[in-house]
Image: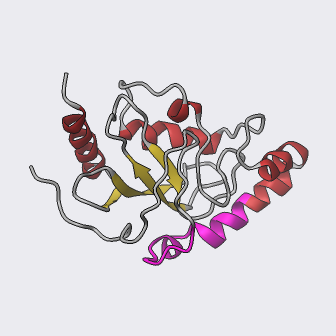
C-alpha cells in the first residue's frame, strides 16, 4: 500500500489532470483551492464556488477538511464559515475514497439532496421545510450574488475561511493562503 504522502500526491495529480481548476497554496500539497461548479439540473447550476481543501498528515486515513470560501445558501453548509456538514467526510470517511470522490460525488450529492434534519444552517433548513419556493428563490439569489465566475476569481477573499469541515480541522494562518508557492517535486 502506498504511503500517505504518495497517496496525497496521486490524488492531487488526478484532481489536477481532471477538469477542476486547482490552486495550490504551498508546495507540500496539504492546503489548496478547487474551483467547483454547481451540479447540472440543480438549483446551484451555473454557480461557481471556491472550495478550500486541507489534507491532514494522515490522509487518506483521515478525511480532508472541505469548506466553501464564497457564500452558499444550503442547510448543510455553515453560511458564515463555509464549513460542510457531510457524514461521508466527517464521520464515515474511508481510505477507499479520494479527492475525486469529494468533487465528483459527495459535494454534488450534498447540493442535490440537502438534509434539513441535520442542519449547519438552521435558517436554510427551516425555510426549506416551511416554504420550498422561498428556499429555492434564496438559493438562486445567493448563486447570483456570490457564486459567479467573476466573484469567484477575486484574489482578495472577504470570507472567513478559517473554519472548515465539522470535524474541527481548521487553519489560522491565512496570511499567504491565496498565493501559489510552487510546484510539487516529481
On screen, residue 120 above or below 158: above
Q: Which residue is nearer to you in this view: 37 or 115?
A: 115
Q: In which quarter of the image is the N terminus?
A: top left
Could you tell me residue 88's position as x and y percent? 53, 30
Residue 115: quarter of image: top right
Q: Position of residue 73 (x, y in %)?
A: 69, 57
Q: Which residue is drawn at 61% across and 58% down?
A: 81
| Span of residues in magenta | 139-159
Q: Is residue 31 left or right of residue 67?
A: left
Q: Does the magenta stretch include residue 143?
A: yes
Residue 165 appears at what percent x and percent y? 54, 45
The residue depicted at 85 percent of the width and 50 percent of the height is 127
Looking at the image, residue 152 sits to the left or right of residue 15; the answer is: right
Figure quadrant of residue 34: bottom left
Q: Nearer the viewer, residue 2 or 39?
A: 2
Q: Is 70 placed left or right of 129 in the picture?
A: left
**Residue extending furthest left?**
186
Amino acid at each position: 500500500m502506498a504511503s500517505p504522502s504518495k497517496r496525497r500526491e496521486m490524488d492531487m495529480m488526478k484532481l489536477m489532470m481532471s477538469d477542476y481548476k486547482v490552486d495550490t497554496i504551498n508546495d507540500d500539497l496539504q492546503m489548496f483551492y478547487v474551483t467547483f461548479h454547481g451540479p447540472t439540473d440543480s438549483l446551484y447550476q451555473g454557480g461557481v464556488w471556491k472550495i478550500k481543501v486541507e489534507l491532514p498528515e494522515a490522509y487518506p486515513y483521515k478525511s480532508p477538511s472541505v469548506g466553501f470560501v464564497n457564500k452558499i445558501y444550503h442547510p448543510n453548509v455553515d453560511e458564515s464559515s463555509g464549513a460542510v456538514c457531510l457524514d461521508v467526510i466527517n464521520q464515515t470517511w474511508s481510505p477507499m475514497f479520494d479527492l475525486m470522490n469529494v468533487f465528483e460525488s459527495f459535494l454534488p450529492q450534498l447540493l442535490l439532496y440537502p438534509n434539513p434534519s441535520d442542519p449547519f444552517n438552521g435558517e436554510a433548513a427551516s425555510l426549506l421545510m416551511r416554504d420550498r419556493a422561498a428556499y429555492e428563490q434564496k438559493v438562486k439569489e445567493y448563486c447570483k450574488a456570490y457564486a459567479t465566475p467573476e466573484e469567484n476569481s477575486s484574489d482578495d477573499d472577504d470570507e472567513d475561511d478559517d473554519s472548515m469541515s465539522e470535524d474541527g480541522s481548521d487553519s489560522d494562518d491565512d496570511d499567504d493562503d491565496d498565493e501559489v508557492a510552487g510546484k510539487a517535486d516529481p
